[in-house]
Every structure is written in structure tokens, then in C-alpha cells.
Amino acid sequence: MKLFYFFLKKIGFKLSKIDKSEDLPILEQKYRIGSNVEFSESEIGDYSYISPDSKFHSTKIGKYCSIGPNVICGYGEHPINFLSTSPLFYYGKKKFDIKITSIDYFEHHKKVIIKNDVWIGANVYIKNGITIGNGAIIGAGSVVVNDVEDYAVVVGVPAKVIKYRFEKEDIIELLKIKWWDLNIVNIDKLHHLFVDDNIKNVLIRLKNEIELNNEN
């Protein structure tokens, strides 16, 4: 049984809640990581999920993110201005039967930041060091080599902005509200606002209801 819980930790599930009255920990599953996912030196926020066969390295994922299958993110880069692109010469850890250096001469795993409420389609590649803003959408098959702004929709190789989900003033209001930081109990009460496609109406009602809750 201990081996089972060790395996769960390795694939990214949290074992954060322990009932001391029982011998075994209770699994508090606030996010989902699909089968055959590589997930190393990374973290994932509540109510986000990663679909099967994706690879994540050195990545921070926010809350409420939806990530499709076969996504590769932060998987490492090679220098293009050195004499060779081989890690044998710039990577401090031993990869082969010899070790030339113990020093890292190149930052090959710059951290990727995926903020909150981001939707990433299937078969997307995200370059190291990229930041993807809140509410952004990455179309399936895209190659992301530049930062993505909040609520932008990007597609293509390389990925380019084709539109923004909402008007600029509405995006500003959404970033002020930061609904993803609300308590899940309050979000549950506000569910009706999450299925309304009139964003201006939603913003007015959302601000009013948040203010009302704060007063109470």
C-alpha cells in the first residue's frame, strides 16, 4: 500500500490531507493528471487537468486550466550559438559514458508559467521560458515560441494571435476580479454566471455578488 501512495506522488497527485485517526492517508484530488503523463519539476493548481500522453517539465500551471493530450511543455532546449548543440559539452549531469563538465553552461530548462483558466488544445508545443496569460486559448497543433497575453486566442506554427476573447475593458475588469482566487464554495454559488455568454452582464453581476458576499 505504501508503494501505491508513493506512485501517486510520483505522477503528481497530492497527498495533502491526512486523517490521523486512520492508518492510511486520504487522497485529496483537486486536479487530474492523465495516464502516461510525464510531470517533473512542475506544479499544478486546483481544478486543472492534463490529458494523457503529455510531457511537462519546469512548468507552473495555475487554477482551472484545461490541457489536451500530447502537449509538450518546457521540455528543454539546446544552445544554437555554441560550437555544438550536444548536452555533452554544456550540461553538468552525466548523460553518457563520459562526463566532460560538471557545470551547466546553458539554462536549458527556463520555467514556463501557465496562468489561470487557460485552455490548451491537443498536440501543442510550448517553448521554455514562455508565460501564457490568464484566460488564454492555445489552438490544437500550435507551436508557442512567444509569450501569450491574457485572454488571447493563438493558433499556428509559430502561434499567432487571431483574436481576444473579450474587449479590452472587459479583460481589465476580469484581471481585477481574479475570480479564480474565490473560494470554491462561493464559485459554486455563482455558477449561473459561468454559463452566461453576455460577458458585460456577467461582470456587472459578478462584481455586485462579490461585494455582497464581502459585506456579509
Image (cartoon, helix red, strand yellow):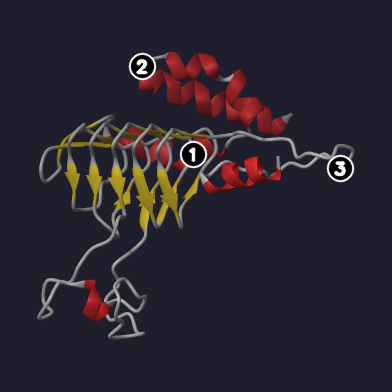
> Looking at numbered disc 3 in the image, what kind of residue is underneath it?
Lys
Pointer 2 with pointer 3, Cβ within 8 A: no
Image coordinates for residue 18, horizontal then vertical, percent: 78, 42
Which mark is in front, 1 or 2? 1
**Disc 2: which residue:** 198
Image coordinates for residue 34, horizontal then vertical, percent: 44, 33
Image coordinates for residue 20, horizontal then vertical, percent: 86, 42
Residue at screen point 70% across, 32% down: 215
N-terminal label among 1 and 3: 3
Secondary element type, mark 2: loop
Give the distance between the C-alpha atoms of the residues marked 1 and 3, in whole angstroms. Answer: 28 Å
Residue at screen point 38% across, 41% down: 134
> Looking at numbered disc 2 in the image, what kind of residue is underneath it?
Asn
**Disc 1: which residue:** 63
Secondary element type, mark 1: loop
The N terminus, quarter of image:
top right
Tell me: residue 88, above or below residue 209: below
- In this view, the residue in front, 180 or 24, is 24
> Looking at numbered disc 1 in the image, what kind of residue is underneath it?
Lys
Residue at screen point 38% across, 32% down: 51
**Outermost residue toward the right in this view:** 21
Tell me: residue 16, above or below residue 196: below
Residue at screen point 29% across, 81% down: 98
Which mark is in front, 2 or 3? 3
N-terminal label among 2 and 3: 3
**Disc 3: which residue:** 20
Badge 2: residue crowd in 10 Å (few <14, some 14–19, many ≥20): few
Badge 1: residue crowd in 10 Å (few <14, some 14–19, many ≥20): many
**Outermost residue toward the front in this view:** 97
Tell me: residue 179, above or below residue 72: above
